[in-house]
Image (cartoon, grey):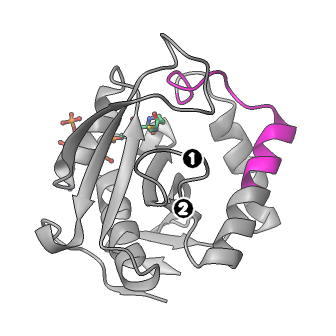
Amino acid sequence: MIETTRLTMTIWTDADLDAVAALNADPEVMRFFPSPLTREESDAAVARWHERLVRTGVGMLCAREKATGAFVGIIGAQWVPYEADFAPAVEIGWRLSPSFWGRGLATEGARAAAEHAFSTAGVERVVAVALPANGPSIAVMRRLGMRDAGFFEHPLLPPGPPHNPHVLHVLEQAAGLPGTLLQGAG
Ligand SMILES: CC(C)(COP(=O)(O)OP(=O)(O)OC[C@H]1O[C@@H](n2cnc3c(N)ncnc32)[C@H](O)[C@@H]1OP(=O)(O)O)[C@@H](O)C(=O)NCCC(=O)NCCS
């Protein structure tokens, strides 16, 4: 479990499946993905994140608001699940319910996920990827102090616009994380 000032980030349980399916079915949330996910696709994604977390010690986690227990979204870190010039590498990622946008929660959770990856995965840098048009996601990367490392072709997505190319951002552990909020991880 990873805990920040405002969030808990935990392994998935069956009780989370309805909430994450609603998030993954929301066209606004999924506008930079090929399509929203069906219930079956969402459940399969959660199963993959769960399996990777158990197998590697890092994974995409279920983020909840500490104060209320409300489901906030998906935040975490995972080994890049495809071949690329920059892999093997651990990537950090985020997908929040719109009612939790605009409060700094993605940045707060991602900062903790990066610190957790540095301390448990034996890596000295983490990466993040997004479509160039995904300004809110790239803004999270900038708030984390990540540097722009250029473009790459995401091999799991169709070539050409609107699915490619992607931008790559890198955060070196040595560079330090601005405004660390991690309180505990384990
Ligand atoms: C990407 C995504 C998580 C970004 O959400 P976000 O709310 O913009 O990002 P944060 O949670 O870090 O919040 C930052 C915003 O909160 C504001 N904020 C308020 N309180 C804050 C605080 N205490 N700390 C930091 N920022 C704060 C910031 O000023 C910023 O607002 P701005 O965009 O108007 O400048 C969200 O847009 C999303 O889920 N998108 C759909 C899924 C997606 O595309 N995921 C990424 C795929 S690559």
Residue type indicated by callout 1: Glu
Q: Nearer the viewer, residue 73 or 167?
A: 167
Please state the horizontal and vertical placement of residue 123, each as a whole percent of the image. 37, 74
Which of 57 and 102 lies nearest the eye of the viewer?
Answer: 57
Query: Mark 2, mark 1: which one is toward the viewer?
Result: 1
The region drawn magenta spans: 29-46
Residue 103 visible in the snapshot: no
Q: Tell me where residue 33 appears, x and y as whole percent.
A: 57, 26
**What residue sits right under mark 2 in the picture?**
79
In the image, what residue occupies the spot 61% across and 52% down? 81
Position of residue 170 in the picture relative to residue 96 (left or right) = left
Tell me if residue 50 comes above or below residue 43 in the rendering: below
Q: Residue at (72%, 66%) from the top-left corner?
A: 50
SS of the residue at dot 1? Answer: loop
Residue 83, label in figure:
1
The answer to which of 19 and 46 lies nearer the viewer is 46
Which quadrant does ligand 1 occupy? Answer: top left
Q: Relative to residue 119, is residue 52 drawn left or right?
A: right
Give left or right: position of 74 versus 140. right
Residue that appears at 58% across and 79% down:
57
